[in-house]
Image: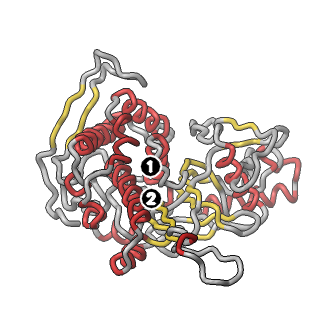
Amino acid sequence: MSKDGSDKQHIVDPVGVVPGEEMTSRSNGIPRQVSSDYEPIDGVSVHTQNDGYVELFANDPEYGHIVREAEIAIEDGILPTLSSKGTSGCYFVQNREKKTIGVFKPKDEEPYGQLNPKWTKWMHKLCCPCCFGRSCLVPNQGYLSEAGASVVDQKLLLNIVPKTKIVKLASETFNYNAIDRAKAMTKKNLLQKVPAVGKRFHRIGLPPKVGSFQLFVTGYKDADFWLRRFDNESLPQSTAQTFQHLFEKLVVLDYIIRNTDRGNDNWLIKYEQASTRTHSGEEAEWSLVENPEISVAAIDNGLAFPCKHPDEWRAYPYHWAWLPQAKVPFSAEIKDLVLPQLSDMNFVQDLCDDLYELFKTDKGFDRHTFDKQMAVVRGQILNLTQALKDDKSPVQLVQMPVVTVERNKAGQGRIRTDSDTFTQTFAHRAPFFSWC
């Protein structure tokens, strides 16, 4: 089952409006949207909101249908529930059958957000104002990082990140300030007592929150659970090879986005042990024994895309580097999957531009800061490409000198030209603690 906590799961997107429906007809003030294991709804048209948020699932009706189901469930009183784990607002979203279909993380309820319902980070900031947070990360952009990891995952066809997009949702169970709740209650009372006046309101109910919505995955456990089991129970060779390939996909993802929070408790493994097929209760023949199936889900991607490499107190290492799988050189399968794309500067620039389209939707977006983030991404891709060509292992990859690659200001646009120039810069400053 999918983990929750301060960095977890899935997203809903801006506005999908059924033709003929008015925005004020919704009790929570947001137009209904789309959801999961259902057929796309005919006649649904999706528009972009005036506040600049880009519609991310206009061409993804399956994901959109999941979002729609989430909103309908909220309108029917099946409200998202706050996770007891983690240090921020993380909500499990259900459909009308009360089945969890997504995990929503509002921007303003992130660890240092102004409406974070958990007190631990608030105390941290209050008591230690000069040493809180991660200086290499852009504050309050965890929701963008969650969605950005999904962009990288889909671009490289890794398929290990549960689909994640940016959306807006409203629910009474979210953490709102007293003013917003009072306004919502006043409008509701006016609508009931003086319908003519109430109908003039642009929105009835609590204001929607922007955040990441990640599709919920089932049947998974923390990687740490299965890794401990694998230490004592050897995997069949074919399953071990599959797991190695999935592990290498995780390495590729984490290294490119420079994940600063990848422990063995925040990625997931689904392991379905071997089963036998019998027709009459008799002992099955060995030829009918099915191999165990294994899958990996890379969740908790909210602390990635730094604007510089960690160079102060903590290094934030990749904890998978201590696993035995990290000592094995990258396989031919992972090279065939990602090396042609990562070696193409046009592909890399296109990836950066896709991330730009995502990150610029944030109201606090700063182009200079974003360029620094992409300089880190390009540097990571440069190291990863070289490691793949040199038949290095993941542990050798993380030992390579970190580098940033800046694109010159003249080269702007989705296609790299011959006039583009890039500047490589190696980090000369190391964190005080390199093991945490």
Q: Is residue 122 visible?
A: no
Q: Is residue 348 visible?
A: yes
Closer to the camera in the image, 68 or 170: 68
Q: Quadrant of residue 407?
A: top left
Residue denoted by label 2: 298
Residue 56: percent from left, percent from top = 59, 40
Front tag of 1 and 2: 2
The extreme left residue here reads 428
**On residue 149, which mark appears?**
1
Disc 1 vs disc 2: Cβ atoms closer than 8 Å?
A: yes
Q: How many marks?
A: 2
Residue 252: percent from left, percent from top = 35, 49
Residue 321: percent from left, percent from top = 26, 62
Closer to the camera in the image, 19 or 214: 214
Q: Quadrant of residue 194?
A: bottom right
Which residue is located at x 61 percent, y 39 percent?
55
Q: Is residue 66 above or below residue 6?
A: above
Element at label 2 = loop
Closer to the camera in the image, 117 or 322: 322
Q: Amino acid at mark 2?
A: Ala
Residue 99: percent from left, percent from top = 69, 68
